[in-house]
C-alpha cells in the first residue's frame, strides 16, 4: 500500500550508502507509525461511531474540586482538611527533608548530590539574592526566606505533577475497599496558596523599605529621581498603583500557570474524549497531553518557582535601593 | 472547575447566554494570546541575536531571557483568568 512504497523511497533517500541491510529506513518507520496511528483512529470511529454519547457518570473536572475530608469549622470559617492541605503538607515535608538531608551531607569531597546542592545554593544565594539585593547584610538576612520560598514552590509544583490517589469523588474498588482514584492536583493551582505567599512578600518589602528610609522617605523613593514639582504627583499615584498590581501579577502568574497546565493535561489526556464521548479524539489528543506534561515538568514547574523567588528578591532589593 | 461541560454543551438547546459566555472565553483567551506570542518570539529572537554577537555572554543573557520569557508568558494567563471571570461571574 502507500506506506510500503514510501518505505522503499525513504530507504533510497535517507540512507544511500548502507541502507540496504536494515530494510526499513527512519522515514519508513515514521510513515508506518503514522499509518498505524490513523488506522487506530479510523478503527475507533468504525467501532464506536462518529457521533458522541452523552456522558453523565464520570466528571473529569471533579479533579479540581476540594472535597472536605475532615470537616473543621471554626467560627464560620471553613478550615476543613482537603487535598490542597495534603499537598501543602507534602511539599512542606519534602522541603524540610531535603534541606536537613543536604545539611547533614555537606562534605568537602564533591559527589553528585553535593554538586547539585552547590548549584542550588549558588542559584538561590547568588543569582537570586545577592545580585538583586545590593545591601549584603540585608541579602544575608533574606537569603533564607527566598531560598525557602523557591524550594517550597519547586517541590509543590513538582509534586503536583505526580499522580496521587486523591480524587475522592471517584473511587476504585480493590478487594472490596474503595480507593480514591489517581489524579493530578497542585497546591499552587489553587489561588489561595500563591496569594498568601505574595502577601507575605508584599508586606515584607514594604516593611523593609520603611525600616530603611522611614515612612515618608520610602514613599518619596517611589518617584524616580530627577522628577520634582507638580509632575511628581501623577507619577506617585501610578507607582502606588503598580505596587498593588504586583499583588495580582505575582500571585496570578504562578496560580494561572499551574492551573492552565493542569487543565491542558486534563483536557488533552482524555477529558475531551470523555466529555464528548468520542473515543477517536482521545487517540489524537493523548500525544499532545504527553508533550504538555513534559513541557510542564521540565520547564514551567521550575521556571515559575524561580520567577516567584527572584521577583521577591527584586522587590525587596528595589524597596531598599538608594535610588529608584 | 466546570469549564469544560458548558463549553461542550453550549450548542443548540442551551444556546443564548451560555454560548455568549463560551464565545467570550474563547475570544478573550485567543486575543490575549496574540500579544504574549509576539513578545515571546521577540525575546527569543533577540536572545539568538545577542548570543551570536557576543557568545561569551551566553549564560548571563540566558538567565535574563528566562525572566523575560516568564514575565511575558504570564500575560496570556491574565487574559485567561479574566476570561474565566467573564465565563463564571458575569
Image (tube, rainbow, N blue to C red):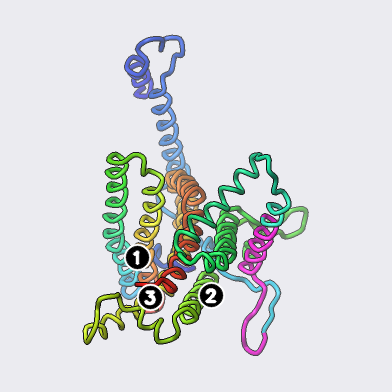
* Residues indicated by labels 3 and 1 sit on the same polypeptide chain: no
**Residue bearing the label numbered 3:** A245
Would you say A142 lies left or right of A240 here?
Answer: right
Label 3: how many Cα within 10 Å (few below 14, some 14–19, many 20+): few
Would you say A247 lies left or right of A241 here?
Answer: right
**Residue bearing the label numbered 1:** B11
Residue range (magenta): A74-98
Q: Quadrant of residue A256?
A: bottom left
Judging depth in this view, the residue of A16 and A124 nearest the camera is A124
Residue A177 against residue A66 in the figure, above or below: above
* Residues indicated by labels 3 and 2 sit on the same polypeptide chain: yes
Q: Residue A82 colored magenta?
A: yes
Disc marking residue A200: 2
- What secondary structure is marked by label 1? loop
Q: Position of residue A71 (x, y in %)?
A: 69, 78
Q: Quadrant of residue B83?
A: bottom left
Judging depth in this view, the residue of A46 and A307 nearest the camera is A307
Can you tell which of label 3 and label 1 is closer to the viewer? 3
Q: Main secondary structure of the magenta part?
A: helix
Amino acid at each position: 500500500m502507500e506506506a510500503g512504497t514510501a518505505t522503499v523511497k525513504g530507504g533510497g533517500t535517507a540512507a544511500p550508502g548502507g541502507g540496504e541491510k536494515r530494510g526499513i529506513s527512519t522515514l519508513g518507520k515514521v510513515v508506518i507509525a503514522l499509518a498505524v496511528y490513523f488506522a487506530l483512529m479510523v478503527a475507533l470511529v468504525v467501532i464506536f461511531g462518529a457521533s458522541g454519547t452523552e456522558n453523565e457518570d464520570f466528571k473529569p473536572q471533579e479533579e479540581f474540586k476540594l472535597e472536605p475530608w475532615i470537616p473543621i469549622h471554626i467560627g464560620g470559617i471553613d478550615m476543613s482538611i482537603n487535598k490542597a492541605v495534603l499537598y501543602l503538607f507534602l511539599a512542606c515535608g519534602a522541603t524540610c527533608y531535603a534541606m536537613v538531608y543536604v545539611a547533614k551531607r555537606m562534605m568537602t569531597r564533591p559527589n553528585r548530590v553535593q554538586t547539585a546542592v552547590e548549584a542550588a545554593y549558588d542559584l538561590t544565594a547568588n543569582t537570586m539574592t545577592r545580585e538583586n539585593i545590593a545591601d549584603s547584610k540585608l541579602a544575608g538576612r533574606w537569603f533564607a526566606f527566598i531560598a525557602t520560598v523557591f524550594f517550597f514552590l519547586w517541590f509543590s509544583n513538582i509534586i503536583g505533577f505526580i499522580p496521587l490517589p486523591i480524587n475522592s469523588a471517584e473511587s476504585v474498588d480493590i478487594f472490596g475497599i474503595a480507593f480514591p482514584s489517581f489524579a493530578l492536583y497542585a497546591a499552587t493551582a489553587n489561588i489561595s496558596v500563591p496569594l498568601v505567599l505574595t502577601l507575605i512578600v508584599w508586606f515584607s518589602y514594604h516593611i523593609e523599605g520603611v525600616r530603611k528610609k522611614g515612612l515618608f522617605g520610602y514613599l518619596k523613593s517611589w518617584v524616580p529621581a530627577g522628577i520634582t514639582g507638580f509632575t511628581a504627583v501623577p507619577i506617585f499615584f501610578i507607582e502606588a498603583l503598580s505596587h498593588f498590581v504586583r499583588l495580582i501579577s505575582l500571585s496570578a502568574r504562578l496560580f494561572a500557570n499551574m492551573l492552565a497546565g493542569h487543565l491542558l493535561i486534563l483536557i488533552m489526556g482524555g477529558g475531551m474524549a470523555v466529555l464528548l464521548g468520542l473515543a477517536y479524539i482521545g487517540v489524537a489528543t493523548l500525544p499532545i497531553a504527553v508533550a504538555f506534561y513534559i513541557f510542564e515538568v521540565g520547564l514551567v514547574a521550575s521556571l515559575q518557582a524561580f520567577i516567584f523567588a527572584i521577583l521577591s528578591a527584586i522587590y525587596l532589593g528595589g524597596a531598599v535601593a538608594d535610588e529608584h | 472547575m466546570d469549564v469544560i461541560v458548558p463549553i461542550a454543551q453550549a450548542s443548540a438547546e442551551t444556546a443564548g447566554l451560555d454560548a455568549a459566555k463560551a464565545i467570550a472565553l474563547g475570544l478573550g483567551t485567543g486575543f490575549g494570546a496574540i500579544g504574549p506570542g509576539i513578545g515571546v518570539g521577540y525575546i527569543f529572537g533577540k536572545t539568538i541575536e545577542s548570543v551570536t554577537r557576543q557568545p561569551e555572554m551566553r549564560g548571563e543573557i540566558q538567565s535574563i531571557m528566562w525572566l523575560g520569557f516568564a514575565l511575558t508568558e504570564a500575560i496570556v494567563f491574565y487574559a485567561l483568568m479574566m476570561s474565566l471571570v467573564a465565563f463564571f461571574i458575569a
